[in-house]
Image: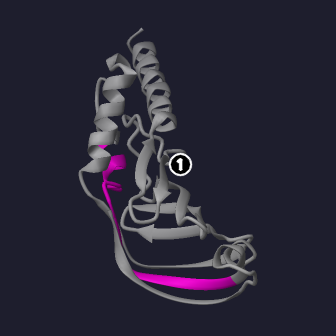
Amino acid sequence: GLAGTVSAAAEFNGSGETLAEAIDAMTGTGSYTVTGFSAAHFDPSVFGNVGRLTGIVDMTPEALNKTVTDALSAGSFAAPSLTGSFTIAGGVLRSPNLAIAGAGARIFGGANLSLKDLTLDARYAMSPTDKTDDAASALDSATAEIDALVKGPLWAPTASYDVAALIEGMKIKASEIELARLERLK
């Protein structure tokens, strides 16, 4: 589900009697730029869509989780470009602190790639950049966040999403809104 054109530069060295030993001892640094970046099934409009939900207080966490993940899967995150850097130590390529700005959201996170077996271990968090002033919204755009975990072989990684913190925050804010409404009625 990732797309883009990568340009990269690296300087590295390693030594050993076999290629595996050279990779295990490899060190280096580099940088990369990806143009036309997109991540499928990581739709930034999820924040606006779930922010407009009503009846959250009465929804089960499972139903809210399905609603959020369905909205998340409905589209793609896109950015015109991103630039990052990496280091290589002990045969592991590390690209920490990557920030990607897109329309309506930003992604921040990092990845490790084992060069020995090309296994990826990455974690990224998407948060909204569009702040809402809607007092009736159960979404707190200042703290809203959805995590994506990407793991597995580089040629076929699997992605999973963690929306628990977002759902918990929405349930709490929706309860506060409902309590304020009941207090006004009282």
Residue 39 lies within the magenta run: yes
In the image, 160 versus 50, the foreground residue is 160
Task: Give me the residue at 74% from left, 70% from top.
Answer: 90
Please identify the quadrant where the N terminus is shown. Answer: bottom left
User: Along the horizontal axis of the image, is 87 left or right of 72?
Assistant: right
Residue 147 seen in this snapshot: yes
Res. 5 image quadrant: bottom left
The residue depicted at 71 percent of the width and 74 percent of the height is: 21
Q: Amino acid at mark 1?
A: Ala
Residue 20 in the figure: left or right of residue 54: right
**Furthest-front residue in this view:** 17
Residue 36 seen by the camera = no
Residue 178 picture location, percent across and down:
41, 20
Work out whether 186 lies above or below 47: above
User: Badge 1 is on which residue?
Assistant: 142
Q: Position of residue 54 (x, y in %)?
A: 28, 29
> What element does badge 1 sit on?
loop
Point 27% across, 44% down: residue? 71
